[in-house]
């Protein structure tokens, strides 16, 4: 029994809340950092046992001086936070809804029993396998891109004829902008440039849908996005 106890490792968990994020009393956004190695950013909607948790970003993290680098598993992008006042975190590079804002320190625990709400390592391995599978689907047959609004649950993608795009969460009938920028079509690949992240998201164009390869997504939803019928624009072929 003593041997098993001493083999246990303490878990340091730091929790922050995004300041002035949505001006909605029942919607909050939290950052959880675990042992300065892993992180998770998530929404909490509603109170108590009736609350809904939606995952915005999660992955590995590293610390260099006052800067914290978060590598998002879903999009493969890097978020950069900067420690201010020795405690709060300023978002130097991040998704649109958090860019230029602060994560305010809430709590810290140091225990043997804490268990993260996500298996970060497991999700990372699953994502690597999915990316390999998706990239193997790319072929030389050109598939037309239908412009319009795509969704797969809580996350929506709007691409228009002016080569603009917007990615947003739809929560409780409220729209929260996650990313915006310019898009380009390269064969059957759709690339979306986000200036806040200085990064290109990647989706594959399939018949009647888009497959997210490197793209922000809620963990419980599909990687496949389908066109919303009332959001149709023109076809584009390149």
Image (spheres, rainbow, N blue to C red):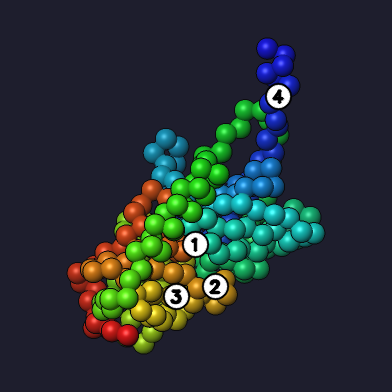
Marks 1/3: CA–CA distance? 11 Å
* Closer-to-camera residue (176/195): 195
x, y (%) of residue 68? 70, 58
Disc 3 on helix, strand or loop?
A: strand
Viewer can see residue 220 = yes
Disc 4 on helix, strand or loop?
A: helix
Q: Residue 7: which disc?
A: 4
Label pair 1/2, CB-CB below 8 angstroms? yes
Marks 2/3: CA–CA distance? 8 Å
Q: Residue 8: which disc?
A: none
Question: Between disc 1 and disc 2, whose residue precedes?
Answer: 1
Marks 4/3: CA–CA distance? 46 Å
Residue tagged 2: 199
Asked where in the image residue 154 lies, by quadrant, the reply is bottom left
Q: In this rendering, would 229 be left or right of 136?
A: left
Viewer can see residue 172 = no
* Closer-to-camera residue (39/211): 211
Residue tagged 1: 75
Question: Between disc 2 and disc 3, whose residue precedes?
Answer: 3
Question: Between disc 4 and disc 1, whose residue precedes?
Answer: 4
Question: Between disc 1 and disc 3, whose residue precedes?
Answer: 1
* Closer-to-camera residue (173/118): 118
Would you call the spot at circle 2 few (<14 residues within 10 Å), some (14-19), or many (20 or more)?
A: some
Disc 1 on helix, strand or loop?
A: loop
Point out the residue furthest to the top here: 1
Disc 2 on helix, strand or loop?
A: strand
Marks 1/2: CA–CA distance? 9 Å
Residue tagged 3: 192
x 69%, y 47%: residue: 36
Label pair 4/3, CB-CB below 8 angstroms? no
Asked where in the image residue 131 lies, by quadrant, the reply is bottom left
Would you call the spot at circle 4 few (<14 residues within 10 Å), some (14-19), or many (20 or more)?
A: few
């Amino acid at each position: 029994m003593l041997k098993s106890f001493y083999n246990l490792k303490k878990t340091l968990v730091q929790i922050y809340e995004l300041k002035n994020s949505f001006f909605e009393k029942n919607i909050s956004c939290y950052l959880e950092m675990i042992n300065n190695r892993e992180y998770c950013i998530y929404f909490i909607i509603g109170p108590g046992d009736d609350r809904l948790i939606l995952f915005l970003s999660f992955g590995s993290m590293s610390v260099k001086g006052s800067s914290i680098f978060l590598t998002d598993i879903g999009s493969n992008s890097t978020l950069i936070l900067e420690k201010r006042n020795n405690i709060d975190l300023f978002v130097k590079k991040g998704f649109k809804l958090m860019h230029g804002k602060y994560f305010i320190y809430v709590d810290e625990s140091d225990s043997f029993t804490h268990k993260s709400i996500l298996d970060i390592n497991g999700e990372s391995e699953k994502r690597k396998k999915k990316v390999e599978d998706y990239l193997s689907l790319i072929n030389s047959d050109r598939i037309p891109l239908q412009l319009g609004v795509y969704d797969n649950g809580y996350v929506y993608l709007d691409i228009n004829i002016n080569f603009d795009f917007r990615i947003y969460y739809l929560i409780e009938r409220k729209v929260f902008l996650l990313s915006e920028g310019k898009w380009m079509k390269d064969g059957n690949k759709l690339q979306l440039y986000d200036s806040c992240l200085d990064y290109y998201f990647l989706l594959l164009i399939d018949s009647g849908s888009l497959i997210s390869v490197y793209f922000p997504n809620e963990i419980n939803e599909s990687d496949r996005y389908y066109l919303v019928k009332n959001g149709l624009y023109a076809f584009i072929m390149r």
